[in-house]
Image (tube, rainbow, N blue to C red):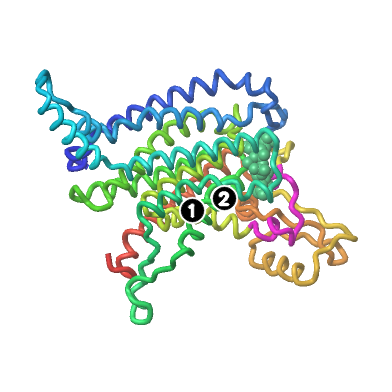
């Protein structure tokens, strides 16, 4: 890192300092604005408690706004040197010719100003602002699932436009075993934009559906952000200037304040939660990852870090696409007698039974211990557990306390994430020439 500090280190220190401020400000704002949010009707019932209290919801909107302000204040820092270079004039030499020469010189320097880097920053901010706006809209009006699914696609347009103008790289590296047939690079053209838009839709939504127990939305986001930051530091440790240094510094500038606001939120959202994060936070967190990984050119690394979310999404498909009924809430069921969480279930009745192929699939999943299937005396479906990773974990581990479940899932995610990073940096060399 020492080299990075010599090269471009000051903005990183400013970013660290601003992240501290972001933490402190979010912490205070969450406390101050909690009652205000409740008064405005932004509240939710904590369903996994004996006394089902209402607590403020949409606190993610508060921290997202703090984050955006901090990121906006930060804009001048990475450009400080360029701005100084472009605007520094002479002292008190008031000869006209000198002034003209200086203006020419200044014009040349302005010409060298990294406009494309600034465009990346600004497009990232526009994307994050759009997703926050749409997220708050969702928390206020409870948009239907099939409508809100595409919200992030709109927010990703500014990113994709900047990607198109500035980089426009749409080729992918072919794994060594396939290179004799396909060549070293394959240009996938417009499909690459479809792929990036899909990542943008997937990341926020996948965080929103791995939810429903205190702390889990924030803790999974913190784990992903930390792993992305570690991945950035691995690049920054290489001798400066590495071609990827700039994009990984860019990524850190966006991740550090995110960690700041998220830690303040986790403090209040961890079991027993005093606030709920709302859909705003899930969308916003997912979009932060999309922004850094698309503009930093490492969207494949992001995918490796989203393995638990990808599993949860694929596992959820039968309910998301209506093959199995999907209740409004699929969060684990709180057993008030034991104080423990149990898998929540979809009930089946005599008249409402799954169609033959679905019934077969459910039984196979049951045999594989990927679902708990309960049949009645006549062999008809009585209930099946809901298709989320949280319920599946409870099927495997038995009833757990809410904080225990959140902790175990977070640890599992950290382990899987480190494995993802290992694949990226260790195995990738074997299949792709670096
Ligand atoms: C998503 C999930 C839904 C899950 C919900 C929980 C899908 C398709 N949707 O819906 O199954 O039940 O998240 O967040 O998978 N809540 C708690 N404890 C918590 C967090 C939330 O009781 O720790 C409850 C509160 O009543 C809160 C509500 O969940 O008000 C928030 O749900 P919301 O974020 O609106 O649900 P969705 O994101 O639509
Ligand atoms: Mg939600």
> Label 2 near label 1: C-beta < 8 Å?
yes
Residue 332 sits inside the magenta stretch: yes
- Dot 2 alpha-carbon crowd within 10 angstroms: few under 14, some 14 to 19, many 20 or more: many
Label 1 sits on residue? 306
Q: Can residue 340 be seen in this view?
A: no
> What residue is shown at x 68% (from left), y 20% (from top)?
39
Per the rendering, the mark at residue 325 is none
With 143 as the anchor, is 114 left or right in this view?
left
Which residue is most to the front?
96
Determine the image quadrant of residue 329. Answer: top right
Where residue 273 appears, x then y in whole percent? 60, 30
433 vs 161, nearest the viewer: 161
Q: Is mark 1 on a helix, strand or loop?
A: loop
* Residue 315 horizontal side relative to residue 77, left or right: right
Magenta region, residue range:
316-333
Q: How far apart are marks 1 and 2 (CA)?
A: 9 Å
Residue 195, percent from left and from top: 49, 60
Q: Which residue is drawn at 63% across and 30% down?
A: 57
Left or right: 1, with 391 as reference point? left
If the image is split into quadrants, where does the N terminus sit?
top left
Q: In which quarter of the image is ligand 2?
A: top right
In the picture, the quarter occupied by the C terminus is: bottom left
Above or below, 275 against 359 in this view is above
Q: Which of 163 and 257 is in front in this view?
A: 163
- Whichever of labels 1 and 2 marks the residue nearer the N terminus, that label is 2
Please say whether residue 207 is one of the residues in the magenta stretch.
no
**Location of residue 10 (image quadrant):** top left
Q: Which residue lies furthest to the right in this view?
A: 351
Q: In x, y percent, where is residue 148?
A: 65, 46
Residue annotated with mark 2: 206
Q: Answer above or below: position of 384 versus 143.
A: below
């Amino acid at each position: 890192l020492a080299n990075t500090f010599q090269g471009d280190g000051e903005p990183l220190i400013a970013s660290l300092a601003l992240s501290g401020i972001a933490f402190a400000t979010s912490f205070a704002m969450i406390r101050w604005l909690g009652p205000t949010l409740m008064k405005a009707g932004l509240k939710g019932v904590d369903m996994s408690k004996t006394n089902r209290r209402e607590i403020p919801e949409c606190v993610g909107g508060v921290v997202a706004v703090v984050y955006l302000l901090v990121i906006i204040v930060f804009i001048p820092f990475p450009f400080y040197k360029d701005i100084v270079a472009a605007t520094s004039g002479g002292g008190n030499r008031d000869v006209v010719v000198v002034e003209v020469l200086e203006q020419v010189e200044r014009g040349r320097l302005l010409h060298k100003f990294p406009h494309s880097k600034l465009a990346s920053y600004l497009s990232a901010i526009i994307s994050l602002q759009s997703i926050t706006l749409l997220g708050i809209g969702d928390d206020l009006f409870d948009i239907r699932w099939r409508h809100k699914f595409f919200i992030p696609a709109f927010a990703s347009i500014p990113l994709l436009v900047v990607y198109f103008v500035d980089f426009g790289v749409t080729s992918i590296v072919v794994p060594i075993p396939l290179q004799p047939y396909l060549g070293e690079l394959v240009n996938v053209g417009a499909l690459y934009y479809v792929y990036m838009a899909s990542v943008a839709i997937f990341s926020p939504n996948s965080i929103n559906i791995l939810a429903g127990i205190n702390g889990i939305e924030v803790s999974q986001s913190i784990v992903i952000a930390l792993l992305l930051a570690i991945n950035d530091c691995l690049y920054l440790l290489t001798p400066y200037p590495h071609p990827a240094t700039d994009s990984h510094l860019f990524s850190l500038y966006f991740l550090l304040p995110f960690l700041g606001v998220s830690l303040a939120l986790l403090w209040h959202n961890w079991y027993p939660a005093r606030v709920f994060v709302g859909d705003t936070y899930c969308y916003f967190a997912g979009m932060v990852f999309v922004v850094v990984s698309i503009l930093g050119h490492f969207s494949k690394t992001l995918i490796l870090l989203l393995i638990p979310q990808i599993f949860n999404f694929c596992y959820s498909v039968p309910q998301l696409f209506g093959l199995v009924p999907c209740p409004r809430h699929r969060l684990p069921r709180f057993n008030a007698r034991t104080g423990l969480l149990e898998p929540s279930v979809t009930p089946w009745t005599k008249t409402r039974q799954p169609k033959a192929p679905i019934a077969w699939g459910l039984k196979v999943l049951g045999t594989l211990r990927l679902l708990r299937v309960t049949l009645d005396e006549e062999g008809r479906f009585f209930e099946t557990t809901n298709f989320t990773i949280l319920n599946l974990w409870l099927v495997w581990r038995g009833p757990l306390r809410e904080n225990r479940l959140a902790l175990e899932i977070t640890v599992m995610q950290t382990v899987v994430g480190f494995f993802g990073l290992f694949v990226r940096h260790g195995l990738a060399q074997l299949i792709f020439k670096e």
